[in-house]
Amino acid sequence: MLNKINKFFLKNKTNKYLIMGGFSFFLIKGLIWLGIFVFAGFNLIN
């Protein structure tokens, strides 16, 4: 079933770039939030 989904989405380059762009956007967003929480946590400890 996962193979069918991959073939459907990766049929043309536009869908491929859209999926990769969404993944990288949420990855960077998550890393930024992680940095904010770590920074706030260290400030609360001190």
Image: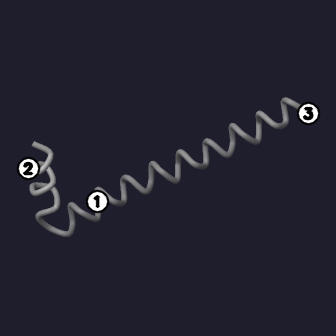
**CA distance separating discs 3 and 2:** 52 Å
Q: Which colour scheme is used?
A: one colour
Residue contact between numbered discs 1 and 3, judged by CB atoms under 8 Å = no
Q: What amino acid is labelled 2 in the image? A: Lys
**CA distance separating discs 1 and 2:** 18 Å
Q: Residue furthest top?
A: 44
User: Which residue is identified by label 2?
Assistant: 4
The answer to which quarter of the image holds residue 24 is bottom left
Q: Residue at x 91, y 33 (%)?
A: 46
Count residues near mark 3 (Cα–Cα under 10 Å), then give few for <14, some for 14-19, many for 20+.
few
Q: Which residue is drawn at 20% across and 69% down?
A: 13
User: Which residue is identified by label 3?
Assistant: 46
Nearest to N terminus: mark 3 or mark 2: 2
In the drawing, what numbered circle is on residue 6?
none
Name the residue nearer the viewer: 15 or 45.
Answer: 45
16 sits left or right of 26 in the view: left
Which element is circle 2 on?
helix
In the drawing, what numbered circle is on residue 18?
1
Q: What amino acid is labelled 1 in the image? A: Leu
Q: Which residue is drawn at 58% across and 48% down?
A: 31
The x, y position of residue 26, in whole percent, is: 45, 48
The answer to which quarter of the image holds residue 37 is top right
Please say if 39 is above or below 13. above
